[in-house]
Image: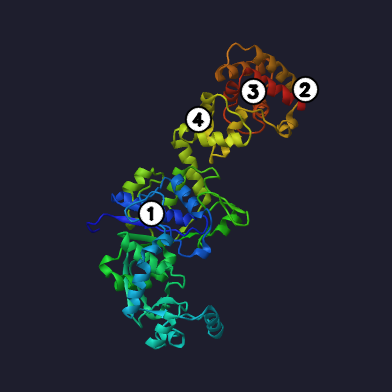
Amino acid sequence: MNNKKVRVRFAPSPTGGLHLGGVRTVLFNYLFAKHHGGDFILRIEDTDQTRFVEGAEEYIFNCLKWCGLEPDESPLHGGPHVPYRQSERKALGLYEKYAKQLVANGQAYYAFDTAEELDAKRKEINNFQYSQHTRNAMKNSLTLSGAETQQLLDEGVPYVVRIKMPENVDVKFNDMIRGEVSFNSSLCDDKVLLKADGMPTYHLAVVVDDHDMEITHAFRGEEWLPSAPVHVLLWQYLFGLDAMPQWAHLPLILKPDGNGKLSKRDGDRLGFPVFAMDWQNADGTVNAGFKERGFLPEAFVNMLAMLGWNAGTEQEVFTMEELVQQFSMERVHKGGAKFDFEKAKWYNHEWIKKLEVGSWKPEVKKLFEEKGIVVMDDAKFEKVLELVKDRCTLLNDFVQQAGFFFQSPTAIDTASIKPKWDEKKQLFFVEAIRMFEQSSLWQATDLEHSFKELAAANQLKPGELMLPLRIMLVGGKFGPGVFEIAELIGREETAKRIGYTLGLL
């Protein structure tokens, strides 16, 4: 680490939902910056206007806010390097300035090939690449005379600027995760740096903006490794390699079976979310999000941190403060991390138990309201949530595990009672209704004692009566202690629910 203040950035394109891998990249950037007392910057890479999706930028900010990963500088938060959208940064003139500097220095060139001419080349040459092997057969400032090139420029003929990759040069850099990485330039194509509409491509923009925003460390997915030699050369040509940020290419998040990168199609196929929050596609279909599936942000972030990193200890549950304190790039793995939805749910269960009920109570209340379950007594609500939280893996589970405390069950599983049901038990529960209605005490322990005494008087085993009582009160074979349920739903409701089920039986 040098003495410069750490500045990291996440630079998403507003083209769709925020995938798990993208959020993990944000998280690792954020943890590294905060661990070193630095800044986390969010820059919107919207140079490809053809792929821009309305609402995607707002969605990205909402996701990061939910995760607790808000940037120090961004289009929303401002900062000393405005603007933070690349489409707006075009007006600064930096991209065009540096593209022309590269051309003047012989490190890039104008290419005038039309889309039709490029398509013809692709049909003529299998796996065609515009590179040192083909550029001399194309229409560009390397094959045209200076006068011809200037005439085309003066006439306003559309062009792109391409980097001129050197021949047979080993381009090297030191990756914080992988150590020294080397590419031979002969294997790389001449990437477009500046498009015909004057907008930069990612390759030029990321280098220019990282320099302008004083980025010290750049962390991105390993899928960007093939582009690294282009970026290294641009740093060398424009600003010098000493100015280049330290890079780390993060391992992929893999499918549960470990075969290939996790995609949204895998989530759809296997029934789990791969986005932080619900994302609605243009065709109206929705890619499920962790938030809407009932995940706590603390659990989601905790789970993501452990996909490709560990603290070197047995600890698995971390607060954000603990992650900031213990995070280091040295402990990020080189290999991909398999996504395990069951493990993700385990983290959520642990965080439901760990957090104070009040921190997630509002979310559960919203879920209740969506199901038409009205909660009038807040103190009772909190008591119920505390009672059932160990039984809930996702926040959505509370609807089933706690909804019956506030609303009579709409369906009763009488099929589980009928096989062992008889007249004697029917009469017992008729008597139990009277006992409950007349009881002067209404505590779980007192109710249990009275119930067992009545069972003994009727020569019945309490164990044979507990399941029917549970099903009468909650509708099925689930829930906490049955007498705790009776205590909380009250005398009148307990008698009413038993009577209703007796009528069905």
Measured Cα–Cα span from mark 4 to mark 3:
27 Å
Q: Which of 110 and 389 is in front in this view?
A: 110
**Circle 2 — which element?**
helix
Which numbered disc flags the more N-terminal residue, 4 or 2? 4
* Place of residue 155 in the rendered image (x, y in percent of width and height, measured from the top left): 45, 80
Residue 386, labelled with which disc? 4
* Most distant residue in the front direction: 155
**Residues at marks 4 and 1, CA–CA distance in whole angstroms:** 33 Å
In front: label 4 or label 2: 4
Q: What's the amino acid at mark 1?
A: Phe
Q: Name the residue under label 2.
A: 423
Q: How crowded is mark 1: few (under 14 residues within 10 Å), some or many (20 or more)?
A: many
Q: Which amino acid does label 2 sit on?
A: Glu
Asked whether residue 246 appears in the rendered view, the answer is: no
- At mark 1, the secondary structure is helix
- Asked if residue 85 is positioned above or below residue 184 in the image, the reply reads above
Mark earlier in primary sequence (4, 3): 4
What amino acid is labelled 4 in the image?
Answer: Glu
State the separation of the CA atoms marked 1 and 3: 56 Å
Which numbered mark, 2 or 1, is in the foreground of this view? 1
Are the residues flagged by discs 2 and 3 in contact, CB closer than 8 Å?
no
Q: Name the residue under label 1.
A: 28
User: Could you tell me the amino acid type at mark 3?
Assistant: Pro
* Mark 2 vs 3, N-terminal side: 2
- Residue located farthest toward the left when viewing the structure as drawn: 3
